[in-house]
Image (tube, rainbow, N blue to C red):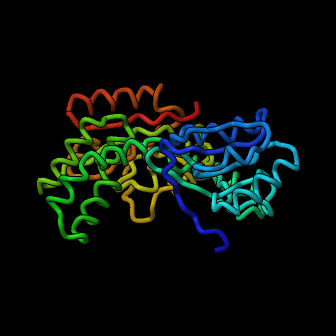
């Protein structure tokens, strides 16, 4: 590991950005988002540097970039000059922002384009709802530490919450119910029932199933499907998941037994007549569910 990764608290701190145009604005935007007071200057003035937490060179003249790098490193101020690793004391990573979750990807300056491609894959795999889940957990932080002083027990409960129904409810936009699930788990109540996901499997091929549909299939305890569902789609489910044909499966009963159930439909679950009927039945029974659309 050539570069040590670190996350800085820049709230209310000055950051000097030397340069101009679109590049300087692009580099300034995430700094402002992190709460920094950005000082933007087209040319480097040594008087701008004292008191700065960071310095960035972005599109300035060569002489200014050289002077900025030398002065910042002499003063112990971390400095980054865009596309000039020899002038840098730190690397700016590709960032996935799921506030308060932040993922940073860096190639150490060797292949920035590759780092951005990896970031794109992470963005697809980590939806924004993970940020809402982290915020929910943070609101219970003091209760979690008070009720679960043993670290191992705390981890077990949190892992169950982050991978179970509480997380599913957050992802489905049902945060009040997720909050109740957190509270019940911390009170030591028995685990609640499961949840049903009505997933559109698209027109057939497995690679037309949405990324969310693929993730849910990989997490399901039970997959309920039509007889003509392609085997390639069913193979997206984990190997120990139970498979049931739709004709004899009662989704509400399965969920009430604590199972995470994926019901697959050909095409788009948001417009499928069987999906609409199943959604109405689940709503009547009080079982939480989410419709995950697919391609028509």
- Residue at image location 57% in from the left, 64% down from the top: 5
Q: Quadrant of residue 92?
A: bottom right
On screen, residue 293 above or below 147? above
Picture coordinates of residue 282, whole percent (x, y): 27, 33
Left of 153 or right of it: where is 23? right
Please state which of residues 141 and 237 is positioned toward the viewer in this rendering. 141
- On the rendered structure, is 20 left or right of 39? right
Q: Position of residue 69 (x, y in %)?
A: 76, 57
Residue nearer the viewer, 293 or 296 = 293
The C terminus lies in quadrant: top right
Q: Where does the image place residue 123, in percent across and percent down from the top left?
A: 57, 47
Question: Is residue 212 shown to the viewer in this render?
Answer: no
Q: Is residue 270 left or right of residue 143?
A: right
Residue shown at the point (31%, 49%) measured from the top left: 138
Q: Quadrant of residue 132?
A: top left
Q: Residue furthest right?
A: 62
Measured from the top left, where is residue 254 in percent x and y?
25, 48
Instruction: Please state, as top left, top right, bottom left or bottom right, where the N terminus lies in the image.
Output: bottom right
Residue 219 visible: yes
Residue 103 versus residue 182: which sits nearer the camera?
103
Q: Residue at x 32, y 37 (%)?
A: 289
């Amino acid at each position: 590991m050539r570069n040590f990764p670190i996350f800085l608290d820049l709230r209310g701190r000055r950051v000097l950005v030397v340069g101009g145009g679109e590049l300087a604005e692009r580099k300034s935007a995430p700094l402002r988002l992190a709460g920094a007071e950005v000082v933007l200057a087209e040319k480097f003035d040594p008087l701008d540097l004292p008191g700065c937490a960071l310095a960035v060179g972005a599109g300035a003249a060569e002489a200014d970039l050289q002077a900025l790098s030398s002065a910042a490193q002499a003063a112990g101020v971390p400095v980054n000059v865009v596309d000039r690793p020899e002038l840098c004391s730190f690397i700016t990573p590709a960032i996935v922002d799921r506030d308060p979750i932040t993922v940073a990807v860096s190639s150490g300056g060797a292949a920035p384009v590759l780092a951005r491609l990896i970031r794109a894959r992470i963005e697809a795999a980590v939806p924004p709802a993970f940020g809402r889940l982290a915020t929910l957990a943070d609101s219970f932080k003091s209760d979690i530490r008070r009720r679960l002083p043993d670290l191992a027990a705390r981890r077990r409960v949190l892992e169950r919450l982050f991978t179970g129904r509480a997380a599913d409810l957050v992802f489905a936009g049902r945060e009040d119910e997720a909050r109740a699930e957190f509270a019940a788990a911390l009170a030591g109540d028995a685990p609640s029932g499961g949840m049903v996901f009505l997933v559109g499997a698209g027109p057939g091929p497995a690679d037309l199933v949405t990324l969310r549909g693929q993730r849910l299939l990989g997490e399901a305890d039970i997959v309920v499907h039509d007889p003509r569902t392609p085997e390639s789609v069913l193979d997206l489910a984990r190997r120990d998941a139970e498979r049931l044909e739709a004709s004899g499966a009662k989704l509400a009963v399965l969920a009430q037994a604590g199972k995470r159930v994926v019901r697959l439909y050909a095409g788009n679950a948001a417009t499928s007549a069987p999906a609409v009927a199943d959604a109405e039945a689940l709503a009547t029974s009080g079982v939480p569910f989410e419709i995950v659309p697919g391609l028509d």
